[in-house]
Amino acid sequence: MTTKTASQKVWIKDVELGDRLGVTRAHVWSMARKDPEFPKPVKLSPGTTRFYLPDVEKMEQKKLAQS
């Protein structure tokens, strides 16, 4: 499930990003730490960290263009 803020930005959970990419939640965090082109997580509040969906989509488009 996606979360929308008042400004209509769309944020996704690490689990949702893993499902989208076909990897585990742990691998999402590994890629976020190691891959400079991977979308960076954003801490929205204590205990709530999300990935910005437009950044994820931009990464996916770039990866598709490279293949």
Image (cartoon, rainbow, N blue to C red):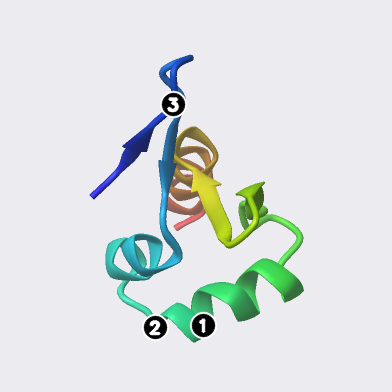
Residue picked out by circle 3: 5
Residue picked out by circle 2: 24
Task: Tell me the mark number nearer the camera, choosing from 1 and 3.
Answer: 3
Residue drawn at the location 32% of the way across and 61% of the way down:
16
Q: Can you tell which mark lies on residue 60?
A: none
Q: Distance between the residues labelled 2 and 3?
A: 26 Å
Which residue is most to the top? 7
Q: Is residue 37 above or below residue 18?
A: above
**Could you tell which of marks 1 and 3 lies nearer the N-terminus?**
3
**Could you tell which of marks 2 and 3 lies nearer the N-terminus?**
3
Residue 51 image offset from top left, x and y in percent: 53, 50
Q: Which of 16 and 63 is in front in this view?
A: 16
Which residue is most to the front? 46
Q: Which of 50 and 66 is in front in this view?
A: 50
Residue picked out by circle 1: 27
Q: Which of 45 and 28 is in front in this view?
A: 45
Q: What element carries label 1?
A: helix
Q: Are marks 1 and 2 in contact (CB under 8 Å)?
A: yes
Q: Quadrant of residue 32?
A: bottom right
* Horizontal side, residue 6 vs residue 36: left or right: left
- Please state which amino acid type lies under the numbered disc 3: Thr
Residue drawn at the location 49% of the way across and 53% of the way down:
63
